[in-house]
Structure formats: C-alpha cells, structure tokens
Image (cartoon, rainbow, N blue to C red):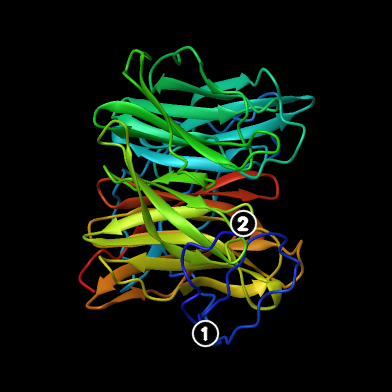
Amino acid sequence: MRTRASLFFCVLIAIGCGDDDAPAESVQTVTPPAEPNVTPTPTPTPTPTVDPNAPVDPDDPLAGLDELDDDVEVAPVGAAVQPPAHGCALYEAAPQRLWATPGPTAVVSVGDDGFVFAGYARRDDQEDLWVVAVRPMGLPRPLLREPLEVPARFDRKAPPGLGAFDSGHVGVAITDGAANARFASLPLGGARSEWILLGTSADQRFAPAVGLRGGRHAVAWTEAEADQPMRVRYAAFDPTGRELARHDLTQAGMGACAPTFVDGDGPLVFLDPHAGTSALLRANLAVDPPEVSVLRPVSHVYDPAKLAAARLGARELVGYTAVGTAAATAVGLVWNEGDRQPPPDALVPSSGYGPLHVSVAQSTSRAVFAADRPRARERDAAREVVVRLAWVEGETTRLGEPTVVHGPNDGPASFGAIARHDDGTYALAFVGEDGVYARFLRCDEGGG
C-alpha cells in the first residue's frame, strides 16, 4: 500500500476503505451527543389536488402527477418559510412523488423552472432515463424519458450526472449496462442533443460530474478497466457539442474515482482511494491542461466512496462516506484552509451497516449537507435522510442540528441529493419504497 500522509489523528469516527464488514482499526472514539429526531414545524402550504401516493401505471409514471387543476396554487420558488436558527424548515407536510419507480436521483436548480431532477428507472426488461422539472408544490413537468440502449442488470448505486449550464439548459451524463459513458445537453423546452460517447469502461458505481466551467460544458467520470487502477477522466465541449479538451486527471502512481464539482465555479474534487489513508485531490479546470493538487489526506473511506464538496470563502469542506466504529458505516466531514487540516467531524456517526450517501448545496455562508442515516443497526435497515448546516465560526467549522426527512407514512428515505436555488430555496430528492420523492426546504443563512 502506498502512504501519502501519516495517520495523524484520533478521530470522532474511524474511517476505512474496502469491505464494510471487515474489522476496523483500533481507535479511540467519542460518543456524540444524541441528536433530536425532530422535524421543524413547516409553514402551512396548499395541498396538491393529486394524491402523490396513488397507484401509477408503470408505462406512464407521471399519470396524474403532471396535470394541474385550474384551482391549484403553486408556491413560487422562494416562498416564505421561516427556518430555525442554524437549521432548516420544510415547506410541505408530506413528500411529493416525482417518479413511480425507485432509483438514485440527481437534482440541480435552473432559473424560473425551479429545479430539475434526473434518475434511472427499471421498467420490465428495460431501463429508462427520466428528467423532470418541478417548482415547490408544483407538479412534475416531464422533460425527457427514454430507454437506455443497454439497460443495467444490477441495482443502481449512483444517479446520472446532472449539471445546470444556464437558465434554459442542463447537461446529463449516463453510464449504461455495458459501461459506456455518454453525455448530452438538454434544453428545458426542447429535444436533447445527440449523445456523445465519453468512454467505454465507465465504473457505474460512481455518478459522472457535470458542470459549466469557463463557458465550457465539463464532464468527469470514473473509468475502471480490467486489472487497472480506477481513473478519473475529463472532457469539455462547446454548446454545439464540439469537443474542446479531453484529459486523464489521474496522477502518476495514483488511482482516482468519485469526481464531484464544488458549486459555482469551484474545482473538481475526487479521491485516490486506499485502505487506511486516501488522498482527496482537486483539479482546476480553468486552465488547460487542468492543474491537479492534493487537497488533504482522509482516513477510512468507504468503498465505493461518495463525496460532496463545498467551499466557504477560503475554507474547503468535503463530506464523505466512511467506515467507523466496529466497521459500522458513517458520513464524515473534513475541511482545510491553507495549511490547517483538523481531524474529521461526523455528519452521521457510525450507528449501522451498509452503504450510505451524501450530497451538498451551498450559499455564500453555509454548506447544507444531506446524508443517509440508518434507522437500525442491521445492514439492510431502513434509512432516513438528515439535513445539516455547516458554517465557519472563527477557527472552527460548526454543525447545526439535523432536520430529519422520512418517506411517505414515516417510510424509508435514502440516496438523499440536495440543490439550492439562487433565491434560497433548497430541494431534496430521495428514494422511498415506491418511487422518487422531493421535499423543499428553507435553511438559515444568517450570521453564525
């Protein structure tokens, strides 16, 4: 094993890579204070005229969900909801169903349309890619639904890549059942562009990253060729689909996986995974070829890793899935500012087994993380999604109390993904027992 940084801390959670049922290294742990499982009381909002839990024809997952009655009141993006200090408040009293088939889902904010969601959905022996636009308390407006040329024959662990290019276009990147990675631009009022083949050895465990950098459509994905270390590759296109750049971001003597963009014009963050200590890396895509540097070491990362990166001023924060006490899984948070690299905190302490997920959205003063949390210790126990604020306070990074989100009828919620609209509205997508759901939130963005 190559070691790029020494193990340098006794931490709140122990973090590891590999089989999550393997014995963990011996560490000292600190039991965090109990977290209240309390959802803030939402401001009353109109009730949709369509029951989001009604049975849906699998051949028409939006049947009844994309039809508004004349008297339905749709809340504007940015509707008035008062969040608690250092926390979040939910708009509506119940989740809103977006799609009738469960599957990992991505979300981004896009202009007047509010938010765009994209996911994979199994249908008989096919697999669909679906994309819808939704405003708070509105009903889904379908943008795209099409079968993948080669459907996946396995349970998806990662959503499509999704990124906003401007107020009228998003980019979508997919990995199919044959490990092909493809990219297309999708106008919110028209047909998508032709699929561009990115590569033929994509690792479907990781979502591609899609963003706009320097006016270019940027896409990064994980490649896994047989008997070779994983690699992160990057390609850039102009709005017509003409290729402008293509690079392997993997550094000499390293592997690479799990690319994710920092909101706004931030860098691409990815991982060189190892048992024990791994390296987080950043790539500056404003120059060609991109400049890649080590962000910081991180210990005991779960395999396959999930990353969520944010930047508050000069402070860079990364949430990551981890293996903690007694090999239970957790979600950690590390940050660095210049040469300062404190030990990790726990967004979700280790309290159960099996994979978890993490996502982040940010304002100028807050990073809002959404992470899965087990509701019991067993590997197949139901999940819930917790939403937690992080903010800079002097020499420390503070974490707010969690807002807990469940599925319909107090059911499970997992694969949480979050995005922030420019007006301060947050959208949370998650997977329930019988479909994909959304909650809309307002979070405290005042002074720390």
Percent of width and height locating residue 102: 67, 42
Position of residue 329 in the picture relative to residue 40 (left or right): right
Is 197 drawn above or below residue 33 in the view shown?
above
Residue indicated by mark 1: 32
Position of residue 22 in the picture relative to residue 197 (left or right): right
For the residue pair 95 and 102, the one nearer the viewer reads as 102
Secondary structure of the residue carrying numbered label 1:
loop
Position of residue 303 in the picture relative to residue 403 (left or right): right
Is 357 drawn above or below residue 347 in the view shown?
above
Is 366 drawn above or below residue 261 in the view shown?
below
Q: Quadrant of the N terminus?
A: bottom right
Percent of width and height locating residue 261: 38, 44
Corner quadrant of residue 185: top left
Percent of width and height locating residue 182: 53, 23
Q: Is residue 210 visible?
A: yes
Residue indicated by mark 2: 413
Secondary structure of the residue carrying numbered label 2:
loop
Percent of width and height locating residue 417: 49, 50
Q: Amino acid at mark 2?
A: Ala
User: Could you tell me which residue is drawn at 64 percent across and 41 percent down?
Assistant: 103
User: Could you tell me which residue is drawn at 34 percent across and 75 percent down?
Assistant: 398
Q: Is residue 117 visible?
A: no
For the residue pair 278 and 404, the one nearer the viewer reads as 278
Q: Earlier in the sequence, mark 2 or mark 1?
A: 1
Q: Quadrant of the C terminus?
A: bottom left
